[in-house]
Amino acid sequence: MEKKTVKQRGSRASSPAPLHDERPANEGEGGASDQEIYERIITSIMEHRLPPGTKLGEDKLAKIFGASRARVRQVLARLALERVVVLHPNRGAFVAEPTVEEAREVFEVRRPLEALVVHRIVAKKDPAIVARLRAHVAAEEAARAARDRRAIIRLSGEYHVLLAELSGSTLAARLMHELASLTCLIIFLYDAPSVPACRDQEHSEITQALADGDEAAAIRLMTEHLEHVEACLDLSRGRPEELDLEAALAG
Amino acid sequence: MEKKTVKQRGSRASSPAPLHDERPANEGEGGASDQEIYERIITSIMEHRLPPGTKLGEDKLAKIFGASRARVRQVLARLALERVVVLHPNRGAFVAEPTVEEAREVFEVRRPLEALVVHRIVAKKDPAIVARLRAHVAAEEAARAARDRRAIIRLSGEYHVLLAELSGSTLAARLMHELASLTCLIIFLYDAPSVPACRDQEHSEITQALADGDEAAAIRLMTEHLEHVEACLDLSRGRPEELDLEAALAG
DNA sequence: AATCTGTATTTTGTCGACAATTTATCGATG
DNA sequence: CATCGATAAATTGTCGACAAAATACAGATT
């Protein structure tokens, strides 16, 4: 019946936090709730279906989701606060295009934050955590086997969010959610097409180190993992368009 | 003429980021802009004029600021996203009351983040940065000399925000702004009244280490500083009311 | 023919009004 | 006299309408 089928997610590691205590749970009808709109948009961004720079017109989104414009506006404001979209006054909302500097800052902050998360996970010594991580890694491998690039990218980011959630720190989980979204945008913008899949089984290795309770190894693997991802990017110069414009104006 | 005089701020280290590119700059009339409302509220929270748990009624705030309810609502949503206020559905907005666990998480994240900021500052070797820091420390000492407890608390938090801003990382600055606000709430909730001013000239010492370019010393001083602040808190048990309620219910 | 200007259309920003839910008040009853 | 229930008040949630700004378009002019 419906033209657009909502993509089913592998292992639910999204949604930064309830923000409200309870939820009306009105699903089924055509109109989507705040949370649904938020997740649909951010999932689309993480899966690179909404490229950086895409205009997110309020009326257009309202029609798509069968919601009022006010509700869409609210969600866009939230996404803007998370820096996943930028708002230009009187011009509208656009999917963010992180600069090279912002990209570096994201990785710079992620490094110690991920180490903190790893430390917490090891301290917990909870076999259930390892099981959840293994399940997620399996979902990642399935997506890789299916050559589903979009799912791969999203699941890769969600692995880190899941890690932060399982660490028990709601603060770290919230920050990681935001940083993971930004990382997806950064990968889209700066990923060097030469090396399509440079980091593959690293999540599996990290999970194994966590299962072994080897904190030092886990942190080392995690740090290297982040460095690999960053190294795969072409951050040597800015995006083509903007830089060309700047250069042309300067010359 | 006006009954409420707006408190003048010492060294402007607030406002996490413009969010919009430009600003209409409509100041002078009675109605306050989004940013003004946001800053007035968060400054009041940081100065402990709005205690945790205070209800922030929309109509009430709208009248106070001479703004529409929609605008106030927008600001409250933003503060809720920063976890400085919590929204209870159909009940309204309240100044957040961080739990003991959340308090610990805040300090846990702050430690590596502040170290990162210190690292960046040292790498910059910019004498202008040291000058700004010294000016801020002087403002702190002036507030201390004037026995202005509220200004002391706010300026103490803003020192760290200023540090993050001067480090050049907009991401770190944004995170530190949020963490500093939460820390102010935490101090209000858990500060042991026995030790009124346990950390005094530590900001000055950190600034000196930064001036000397001694990264190791600066990070050590910063870490100790955070540990001192945390140690001055009484995090051994939860807040009285909630815990009593829990205990009474369990027994 | 290209550019500039003025108008038309689209899109965003803002607000007040209405509906729904919660809280307070008051009366009735055991 | 206390407790429960119903009505009344207040507050939040949601939406559509109007105003302002930006963009797109068309016509006139050099």
Image (cartoon, coloured by chain):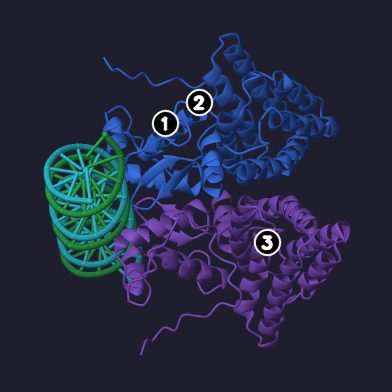
Chain colours: A purple, B blue, C cyan, D green
Q: Residue furthest bottom?
A: A1
Dot 1 or dot 2: first in sequence order is: 1
Q: Residue furthest top?
A: B145
Residue topped by disc 3: A166
Q: Relative to residue A179, is residue C24 depicted above or below?
A: above
Q: CA distance from mark 3 to mark 1?
A: 36 Å
Please tell me how crowded label 1 is: few (under 14), some (14-19), or many (20+) other residues with Cα within 10 Å: some
Q: Mark 3 belongs to which subunit? A: A
The image position of residue B249, as x and y in percent, is 52, 47
**Picture quarter containing residue C7?**
bottom left
Residue at figure coordinates x 36%, y 58% from the top left: A73
Q: Is residue A86 visible?
A: no
Amino acid, disc 3? Leu
Q: Secondary structure at mark 2?
A: loop
Residue topped by disc 1: B40
Residue at figure coordinates x 38%, y 66% from the top left: A33
**Picture quarter containing residue B193?**
top right
> Which mark is in front, 1 or 2?
2
Q: Left or right: where does residue A197 sit relative to residue B19?
A: right
The image position of residue A151, as x and y in percent, is 61, 78
Amino acid, disc 1? Arg
Q: Left or right: where does residue B168 sit relative to residue A66?
A: right
Q: CA distance from mark 1 to mark 2?
A: 11 Å
Q: CA distance from mark 2 to mark 3?
A: 34 Å
Q: Mark 1 belongs to which subunit? A: B
Q: Secondary structure at mark 3?
A: helix
Image mark for residue B47: 2
Residue at figure coordinates x 73%, y 40% from the top left: B111
Amino acid, disc 2? Glu
Work out whether residue B102 or residue A114 is closer to the camera in this orientation and state it. Answer: B102
Work out whether residue A120 or residue B158 is closer to the camera in this orientation and state it. Answer: A120
The image position of residue B105, as x and y in percent, is 66, 45
